Amino acid sequence: MIEMQNVGKVFRTDVVETHALRHFNLKVEPGEFVAITGHSGSGKTTFLNVAGLLEELDSGRYVFDGQDVSKLTDNQRSRIRNEKIGFIFQGFNLIPDLNIYDNVEAPLHYRRMPAAERKRRILSSLERVGLSSRMKHIPSQLSGGQQQRVAIARAVAGEPRVILADEPTGNLDTTMSNQIMELLLQINGAGTTILMVTHNPELAQQAHRQVHIVDGKIDQIHHFNTLKAVPGVGRGAEAVSAGAPI
Amino acid sequence: MEIRALLSAMWRSRVGPVLVAAQVAITLAVVVNVAYIVQLRIETASQPTGLDLDNIFWVTSQAYAADFNGPASVAADLAWLQSLPGVVAAASSSLVPQGFGTMSLAFATDPAALDKGGGQPAVVYFGSEQLIQTLGVKLVAGRAFDPAAVKPPQADPRAALGNWGAEIVITKNLADKLFPNGDALGKIIHAGLVNKPATVVGIVELMQHQRVMGPAASFFSSIVMVPTTPGGARSTYLVRTQPGRRDAIMARVEKELPDLQPGRYISAMESLANTAERQRRGLATNAVMLGVVAAFVVLVTVVGIVGLAAFTVATRTRQLGTRRAIGATKFHILRYFLVENWLITSMGAFIGCGLALAVGIQLSKMYRIPQLPLVYIVGGVVALWLLGLLAVWLPARRAAAISPAIATRTV
Amino acid sequence: MFMHDLRLALHSLRRNPILTALMVIAIAAGIAASMITITLYHSRSGHPIWWKADKLYAVTLDIRDEDNGSNAFANLIRHPEYPPLQVTYQDAKTIYQSDIPTRAVRMFRSSRVIAPRKAGDKPFAVDTRVTTADFFAMFDVPFLYGGGWSRADDEAPTPVVVLSKYANQKLFGGTNSVGKTLTIGDQQFRVVGVIDAWNPAPRFYDLNGNGFDLPENLFMPFGWTEALKLPSNGNSNCVRANTKINTFEELLTSECVWLQYWAELPTASQRQRYQAFVDSYAKDQKRYGRFPRKLNNRIVDVDEWMKMYEVVGDETKIQVAVALMFLLVCVLNTFGLMLAKFLKAAPISGLRRALGASRMDVMRQHLIEVVIVGLLGGALGLMLASGGLRALAAVFTRPTPGQDDNPARVALMQSLMSMDFKMFLVALALALLTGVLAGLYPAWRIGRLSPSLFLKTQ
């Protein structure tokens, strides 16, 4: 699903040059749930940005869903983000001026989808996160947990191949976190690949794999659970790793 | 295009858009009406006069001696002026065209209409034999004054009215009003007040006594020229010269004319081009003042649009990044801002149309000019649309350039 | 406290120099345009003799034909409801006999030429007011030397004249010329008075032509009209259809209006009695076929008189309207910029609120910012306006041919195009008003925001 080979990403200012990612190698199989952990500044957000095609990579090769995406134009990248990737952010990132329904609809707008199909998908994804009754509310009228569920609904409405979650529970209390994790596991169970950046070891342990990043490099990989057999997909947890598996 | 979502977003932060829409509305009302007035002004200021403006000057001789022989002096002055090399024609005239004074009477084909106060108003010129040649106006029918028909000057200037010549030359504008069938030549028309009939012996294609706006414009091109030599203690002569010789002849006249007859002096003298220019300048100064203020109105409104858009971009950075992250292309973002601005401008323009019309009606009443043509409003709306899009272009480009990676940044 | 707020406000303005400059310039431009046009309007609509506002009345008589819908000039008349604004010679003569007014004048503008006083001098063409004796006392004309003449001098007529200060300067080098003689036409006139600087703006007593010209340079007893067959140099309008004139004598008995008529009526009872007198005169004249219309004789005060003549002019009104619209756009614009600026800095306000500043504190601090922008804009606007007015005055005081070199004319134009103290106050008020209009809501909105909103992440 995701295959990074020798990926590097450098941030330059006049004074310093920071290697946010270097010689980064990772392979994620379809249907896998991978937790990304690391300290602040370890490069995990950069990894997520590169993986989600939000930022370009400076070196290496990145194959996404069988397509080399290292050298795509901005428009092509937008298209892939829109059709194949769902994002969940720590700060929810709902559009504050729009109501819940419109928020979920936003990504669907950017592809030419018939109105009836859009509506069906919005309703079913809101149903899935249990917020059908709140469609007309605006984000600020909802609790943090509810907002994140809307964000999840927005991410799954587009029926993406991969969901990228950036500290999805970072702004939430334990109960809420568990609910969100529950939802993500469900979604993963239905076949969607998930990459989740998190600080929380308990959550990380619920993934198939935990990838720990230090200084822009993979330090360790833990295997917690085995990927259930998905038709056409083999066990694919033997990631290429720079660190020693335990 | 997510119009509904866009509208609801606008509604949630409505103060800014409402302010800009209000500016657009006022701007439309101001610009459209000022453009119309300025256009009318320019039209007025460039009305053709029918006169040989560049080659005519006028000079006024004023007597101070009690025993000054006015009538004799007029004849002598004219003979001298006409004898100067380079002079095409010279005449004594009761009015200076494009000048400040005017005299008018009502004219009619039927004297009974005059007794009821009716008829057509017209400007009346009293002039000597060469008046028509001196003005440089073009005869389209008939002839200029017959020297034999020209009445000599009178000692009593008030008596000019009673000294009414029997053959007159009129402008086509007046001829068409009095004789809609176009057969004015040779007909008799009656003048109000002086109660005098006269035969139309010539028709002038066009002559504009003064350049003005509104219904008076037609009045000032309805002119009757009467072959009665005005002048006496105070005489005004019009002199037409060969091209390029005007200034030299003016200098000579200024030097030599006073001494031709003792007991008088030149009280005023100016080229007709200058006289007309002074009238024109009055119109132009006002038009320029209005135009400058209107231009500032547009400028400030454009600044307002840029300001609002820049502010919106600045405050929406995060959501714009999010939109990019979930798949919006740069074009989508650009389009979003252009459409949003277009909607605001349109709302303002919609209200502005009503405002512009209301102001236009008021103005047309005040100036008694035709109502503001709708094409001005249409043009104004289109111009504001374009200006609005232009104004929002840069902020929108900046919005489109926001990196999608903003979305993952924790604030 | 205030000093602290002031410092904060200044700091905040300095933090966004471009935005601040934009707001100041917008307000300045709006105020400059408004002040230029308001000054023109104000100086044109000023009351030139306000201290006698309830005493002086212009008299108009409606002698017009019945409106039969066929008036040749109908298209050119703007206010058909007004009587002719001047009166006929015969009417002026008759109503002058009334002793109801404390003072009365009938008069018109003419033109005379004063012969050179010594060889080598140039003759001097002067605009001349031919008027009855009360003119000077009625309009409070200040005298430098001597005085006016008496009603008996009008009757005689006596060969006396009053000179303007400018004419006295030209003819007598500014010395006391009372008792000296001048040759006008073939007649010797004795100077009885010299008027001091006197430039009513507008020249309300005769608003024909340019209402903002200077008073005449020579004043002559009214009796000379008939004796010298003096022509009117001003507006004359023959308002009745069957009028026929061929000679000067016919003009005097004609239905042509060319005289101005003023009456001084200090009390309400005098005014009522005078209106009744004029109306009964008109009714009486109906017997001779005159005054065919319904009674419409208007005795109007100076203000109304200036309105009837439209002294202020559509041009000026339109300019003021456009300038005020411009100012409004500037206010809306500054409103938007101010709101944007305040909202951008809202987290700082939120922090101040959290640290204990009250809603009022935050509002006051922002209001001070608003007032500073308004005052800066006002000051810049005033400078622009006075520069603009000076430029305009330069355009309008360029000499034109046939015009004398009277320095009073330039002074008059300049005074019409300069701001007096009142205008300065108007500018100040306008600046504060625009600032407050533009900033009140943004300041209020910032004060109202909950501090917690800005302390949370986004």
Image (spheres, coloured by chain):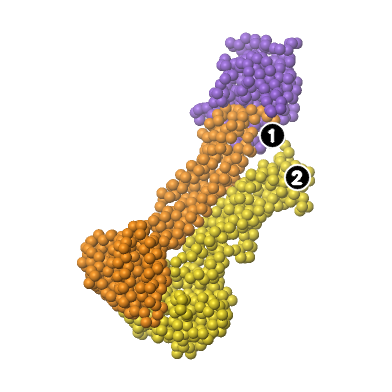
Chain colours: A purple, B orange, C yellow
Q: Where is A95 relative to C121, above or below? A: above
Q: Residue at x 57, y 16 (%)?
A: A68
Q: Where is C101 relative to B361, above or below? A: below
- In whole angstroms, how far apart are the C-alphas of marks 2 and 1? 25 Å
Which residue position is annotated with label 2?
Answer: C353
> In front: C179, or C38?
C179
Q: Which of the numbered marks, if any, corresponds to residue B190?
A: none
- Are dots 2 and 1 on a single chain? no
Q: Secondary structure at mark 1?
A: loop
Among the 4 quarters of the image, the one containing residue A210: top right
| Residue B28 image offset from top left, x and y in percent | 49, 50
Q: Which of the numbered marks, if any, corresponds to residue A143?
A: 1
Q: Residue at x 60, y 40 (%)?
A: B310
Q: What chain letter is assigned to the residue under label 2?
A: C
Q: What chain letter is assigned to the residue under label 1?
A: A
Judge from the rendering whether residue C440 lies leftward or rightward of residue B47; answer left or right.
right
| Crowding at mark 2 (Cα within 10 Å: few <14, some 14-19, many 20+) | some
Among the 4 quarters of the image, the one containing residue C378: bottom right
> In front: C195, or C427?
C195
The C terminus of chain B lies in quadrant: top right
Give the amino acid type for the residue marked by disc 1 in the picture: Ser
| Residue B397 image offset from top left, x and y in percent | 56, 35
Q: Residue at x 41, y 49 (%)?
A: B375
> In front: C311, or C348?
C311
| Of marks 2 and 1, the one in the foreground | 2
